[in-house]
Image (tube, coloured by chain):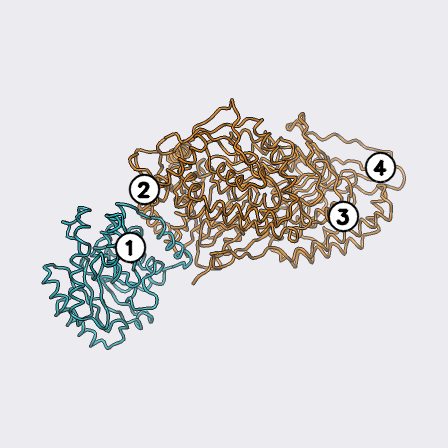
């Protein structure tokens, strides 16, 4: 190259300080162990070798986790103000060395330097500053919560250093320490760790090791790691979910990168076309775009889009005048494969733009006429592709948009306020922008739902990702290696008549409570329930797979009605149920007494259950709030939306209180539920159902009794159950975590540990509210 | 000047269907200014191109034949000869697109340009500039007189009271403003106007010109305007027949940037001839 950009010189100087040989950055020092494989870090365009990067092995991971554990002791106990100070210093450090950072990131990833320089680097600083403020107020605002501990973060290739910043900032702010596993040949995170390390104090709070994603399970299995945060491809996330089942740690997933843009006939089409550019062809996002266009403006939009595409410039990322850079051979091949397949399935492909020919670049691509049922239409759209398809009405648009397993981000383009809000609320996505695409801010939670993974970063939700209620026991490795996932809970042990029926005549057999009434189980068999003396207390129905199927269906049918209820109406119904429980107190207490509970304690349990219903009724009134964002005129709504159909396996202990304590927050947040009550004492829950039957809409609450392992299996593997809470055995917890990988439903398991349901913190704490709903950020920019 | 706009039947449904999202346009305006930062020789080339779009303007109450004459000379020789030589552009006949003056100064301008031996057109603002609030009769007379004096382009201030009541007029060129308003040429407004020009072209095949005026003072601004035209309308509009920049001080800043590009030093004001 004849002429060298000064930025390149700066970069080379930095690489030279490491002798062009990058290791890991652990405990404030470069770590370059011997006898490791190394991979070249290349300029993706020229193929020129910039440096070599080490591939970590298990010992290196262990060393990093050890450093993070040591740092945690001090870091987590510091006053929030001290942590805030440190984060602010790091923000300033980034500011001082931003040129090196953006050059490195742009050169190695191939992304347009404009995007890295004007957006990513300032945003990285804003993230640190925002979270410094959060750390400052932590003692008051987040009382009752404590940092989880050491966080393992796994960032796959093609993700920018900013994705790492989104996650480490809240983790560090609340007092966690972090070990980041980055793919080899991505030096920007290493540089960031070095900048943090050079602040002097608190080495070891941020450690970066480079190695293949396959080291993820190694990182997760290190003692001390409490949580693993993963972002990357859906299938990798699924595999990781299965691998980490039963390891006793939290796993948060942020998967896939596809986005959606919904263009109605009431849109400013030219601006919406710019939205498409922002979404896919400006090096802002990682993935492709699904574009839904209303039929009446289809031709007009396609003309404008194609004209706009013709003016896009593709080139070397460090060129200040390109829209799009290159993303390396893997991304290009993926795009190429998708396009070929789409063509073979009958799609039209339009490519345009000023693209260098002799290079690893891929042109902006617009695909249309892809048959909706073709395999391509089902798979995730890769960068830099846009797949356009038409819709007729807003209702159809919602059906199409929600008809995918993905639930990441979307934008709605319409100048009609009512329509825009209707679509914005109706989309099952983590983020929705109205008449904009791709806006981000540290104060706004960013995340997803469905198979996009239900993890959040930014805003209050980002903080809770790294917090646990104070006093949560440390991680207990409870993995049972020989748990057979294929057979767990597969067969139901046969139940025979348990006679002789002694003492007072046993209660009549209850059916399953499904769809608002008691029904006979599909298997037409019953299981005996014994009292504390081992005598027969009664029979309950033996539910099975078909009963779960029916219950989930009933719950889905009830969902739209319940979601449509105002919080006030929900509160009123929970209040009515509380009153009914109060009236039933003596009968319930008697049931509990038969199971060996002292009458006084039994009465207290009923009373507490009544209180729980009332408390959650009151909390139903206050959900969601407005965020103010710098540089945006207009509000961002942080909505708390129901998860959908929530399956709950109640613990054996506290047969009434635990049942109510779990049911109440679920209903208050608008979910419909399928519950499996206490296995040893299911009858109080069924008693409550007699009131549910008369008070609540049919299908809202469904209670299925039977073999817990079997029912757990059915619900965990059910693809149309949106979330699952499990309170039972160690093995059951492990199975639930493993099986949840199917539709990546968020799960909450107790890993065999008891919970103090009679204590407010554990029985009615904010943790339940957090888990009972999902966040959606709705951006509403305004202007005349 | 391109072929005249022959006009079409007035169809107000075109206008009523237009949707403009203000925040989105503002975002686009910000992006336009950041996405095409050209440097080095490419920057010099774009700056020379920008010179050829300038309507070198003087619209002061105290204009006389002497400063109009100076302006015309500058229009003919916008960049110092030695700088152009260094860029090997001295034989490309780089001049500004036009000279723009008040009607009363048209004679002076025509005479000065003739003396300088060039055929740069003289544009005249007319029709009760800048408010346009005079009688139709005197406004038409004003145009006729300016043309008689040798003006070949007329910047007409439309009757905005008619616009605000939905009675539109046609034109070959549209301007962002007179340059005499409190807010003049801004990117968001220009984006909306350019999109209207493009829509009109797609519907009728007529290319309408565009002239931002007022407040464009720096070379950097001028480059942003050029990239905006290129992005929104395309290269076909990047010619003096369809794009002008109304400016008086812009040229000297462009010349300073060229000076820096050629010499590597920053120029003092007296290093470059005034306009």
Where is mark 1, residue-wise? Answer: B219
Q: Colour of chain B?
A: cyan
Where is mark 2, residue-wise? Answer: A352
Q: Which mark is residue A536?
A: 4
Tags 2 and 4 both on a single chain = yes
Image depth: mark 1 or mark 2 in front: 1
**Crowd around label 3: few <14 · some 14–19 · many ≥20 (10 Å):** few
Image depth: mark 1 or mark 3 in front: 1
Q: Which mark is residue A759?
A: 3
Residue A437: image location, x then y, percent: 45, 50
Q: Image quadrant for the C terminus of chain B?
A: bottom left
Residue A689: image location, x then y, percent: 74, 48
Quarter residue B59 falls in:
bottom left
Q: Residue at x 65, y 59 (%)?
A: A568
- Marks 4/1: CA distance? 93 Å
Could you say which chain is coloured orange in the image? Answer: A
**Crowd around label 2: few <14 · some 14–19 · many ≥20 (10 Å):** some
- Secondary structure, mark 3, is loop
- Secondary structure, mark 1, is helix
Residue A607: image location, x then y, percent: 80, 52
Residue A449: image location, x then y, percent: 55, 44
- Marks 1/2: CA distance? 30 Å
**Crowd around label 4: few <14 · some 14–19 · many ≥20 (10 Å):** many
Q: Are marks 4 and 3 in contact (CB under 8 Å)?
A: no
Which chain does tag 4 point to? A
Which chain does tag 2 point to? A
């Amino acid at each position: 190259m004849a002429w060298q950009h000064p930025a390149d010189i700066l970069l080379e100087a930095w690489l030279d300080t490491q002798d062009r040989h990058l290791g890991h950055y652990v405990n404030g020092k470069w770590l370059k162990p011997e006898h490791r494989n190394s991979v070249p870090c290349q300029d993706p365009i020229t193929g020129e070798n910039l440096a070599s990067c080490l591939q970590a092995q298990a010992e290196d991971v262990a060393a990093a986790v050890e450093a993070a554990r040591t740092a945690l002791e001090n870091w987590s106990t510091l006053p929030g103000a001290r942590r805030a100070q440190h984060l602010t210093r790091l923000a300033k450090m980034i500011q001082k060395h931003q040129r090196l950072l953006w050059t490195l990131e742009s050169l190695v990833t191939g992304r347009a330097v404009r995007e890295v320089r004007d957006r990513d680097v300032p945003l990285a600083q804003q993230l640190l500053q925002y979270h410094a403020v959060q750390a400052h107020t932590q003692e008051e605002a987040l009382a009752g919560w404590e940092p989880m501990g050491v966080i393992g973060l796994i960032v796959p290739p093609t993700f920018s250093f900013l994705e790492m910043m989104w996650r480490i900032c809240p983790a560090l702010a609340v007092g966690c320490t972090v070990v980041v596993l980055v793919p080899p040949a991505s030096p920007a995170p290493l540089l960031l760790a070095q900048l943090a390390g050079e602040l002097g104090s608190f080495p070891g709070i941020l450690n970066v090791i480079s190695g293949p994603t396959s080291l993820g399970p190694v990182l997760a299995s290190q003692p001390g790691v409490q949580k693993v945060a993963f972002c990357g491809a859906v299938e990798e996330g699924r595999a990781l979910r299965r691998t980490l089942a039963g390891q006793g740690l939290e796993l948060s997933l942020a998967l896939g990168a596809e986005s959606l843009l919904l263009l109605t006939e009431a849109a400013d089409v030219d601006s919406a076309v710019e939205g498409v550019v922002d979404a896919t062809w400006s090096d802002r996002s990682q993935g492709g775009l699904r574009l839904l266009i209303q039929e009446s403006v289809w031709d007009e939009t396609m003309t404008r889009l194609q004209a706009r595409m013709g003016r896009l410039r593709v080139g070397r990322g460090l060129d200040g005048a390109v829209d799009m850079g290159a993303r390396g051979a893997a991304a290009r091949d993926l795009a190429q494969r998708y396009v070929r397949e789409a063509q073979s399935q009958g799609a039209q492909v339009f490519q345009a733009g000023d693209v260098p020919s002799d290079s690893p670049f891929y042109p902006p691509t617009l695909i249309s006429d892809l048959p909706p049922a073709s395999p391509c239409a089902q798979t995730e759209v890769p960068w830099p592709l846009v797949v356009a398809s038409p819709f007729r009405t807003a209702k159809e648009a919602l059906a199409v948009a929600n008809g995918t397993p993905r639930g990441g981000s979307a934008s709605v383009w319409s100048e009609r306020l009512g329509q825009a809000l209707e679509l914005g609320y109706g989309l099952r996505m983590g983020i929705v922008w109205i008449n904009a695409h791709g806006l981000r801010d540290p104060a706004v939670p960013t995340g997803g739902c469905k198979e996009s993974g239900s993890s959040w970063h930014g805003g209050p939700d980002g903080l809770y990702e790294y917090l646990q209620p104070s006093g949560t026991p440390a991680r207990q490795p409870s993995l049972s290696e020989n748990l057979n996932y294929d057979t767990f809970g597969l067969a139901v042990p046969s139940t025979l008549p348990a006679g002789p029926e002694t003492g007072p005549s046993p209660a009549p057999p209850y059916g399953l409570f499904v769809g608002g009434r008691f029904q006979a189980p599909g298997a037409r068999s019953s299981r005996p329930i014994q009292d504390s003396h081992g005598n027969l207390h009664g029979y309950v129905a033996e539910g099975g797979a078909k009963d779960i199927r029916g219950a989930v269906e009933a719950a889905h049918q009830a969902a739209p009605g319940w979601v449509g209820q105002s919080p006030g109406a929900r509160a009123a119904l929970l209040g009515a149920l509380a009153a009914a429980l109060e009236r039933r107190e003596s009968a319930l207490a008697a049931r509990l007494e038969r199971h060996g509970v002292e009458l006084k304690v039994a009465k207290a349990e009923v009373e507490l259950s009544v209180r729980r219903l009332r408390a959650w009724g009151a909390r139903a009134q206050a959900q969601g709030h407005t965020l103010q964002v710098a540089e945006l005129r207009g509000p961002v709504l942080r909505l708390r939306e129901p998860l959908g159909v929530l399956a709950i396996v109640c613990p054996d202990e506290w047969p009434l209180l635990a049942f109510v304590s779990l049911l109440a927050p679920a209903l208050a947040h608008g979910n419909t539920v399928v519950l499996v009550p206490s296995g040893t004492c299911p009858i109080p829950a069924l008693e409550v159902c007699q009131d549910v039957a008369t008070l609540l809409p049919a299908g809202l609450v469904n209670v299925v009794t039977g073999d817990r392992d079997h029912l757990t299996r059915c619900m965990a593997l059910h693809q149309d159950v949106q979330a699952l809470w499990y309170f039972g055995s160690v093995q059951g917890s492990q199975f639930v975590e493993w099986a949840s990988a199917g539709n990546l439903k968020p799960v909450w398991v107790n890993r065999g540990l008891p919970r103090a349901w009679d204590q407010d913190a554990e029985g009615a704490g904010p943790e339940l509210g957090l888990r009972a709903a999902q966040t959606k950020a709705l951006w509403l920019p305004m202007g005349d | 000047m391109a072929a005249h706009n022959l006009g079409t039947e007035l169809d107000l449904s075109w206008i009523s269907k237009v949707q403009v999202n203000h925040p989105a346009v503002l975002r686009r305006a910000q992006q336009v200014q950041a996405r095409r930062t050209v440097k080095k020789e490419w920057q010099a080339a774009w700056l020379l191109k920008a010179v050829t779009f300038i309507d070198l303007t003087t619209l002061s109450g105290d204009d006389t034949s002497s400063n109009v004459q100076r302006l015309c000379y500058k229009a003919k020789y916008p960049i110092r000869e030695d700088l152009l030589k260094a860029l090997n552009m001295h034989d490309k006949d780089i001049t500004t697109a036009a000279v723009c003056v008040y009607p009363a100064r048209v004679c002076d301008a025509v005479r000065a340009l003739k003396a300088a031996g060039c055929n740069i057109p003289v544009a005249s603002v007319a029709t009760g500039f800048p408010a346009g609030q005079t009688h139709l009769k005197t406004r038409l007379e004003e145009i006729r007189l300016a043309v008689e004096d040798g003006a070949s382009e007329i910047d007409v201030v439309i009757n905005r009271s008619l616009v605000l009541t939905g009675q539109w007029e046609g034109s070959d060129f549209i301007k962002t403003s007179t340059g005499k308003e409190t807010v003049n040429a801004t990117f968001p407004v220009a984006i909306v106007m350019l999109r209207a020009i493009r829509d009109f072209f797609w519907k009728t095949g007529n290319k309408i010109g565009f002239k931002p005026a007022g407040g464009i003072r720096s070379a950097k601004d001028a480059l942003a305007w050029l990239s905006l035209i290129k992005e929104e309308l395309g290269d076909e509009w990047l010619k003096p027949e369809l794009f002008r920049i109304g400016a008086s001080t812009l040229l000297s800043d462009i010349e300073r940037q060229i000076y820096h590009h050629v010499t590597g030093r920053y120029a003092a004001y007296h290093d470059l001839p005034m306009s």
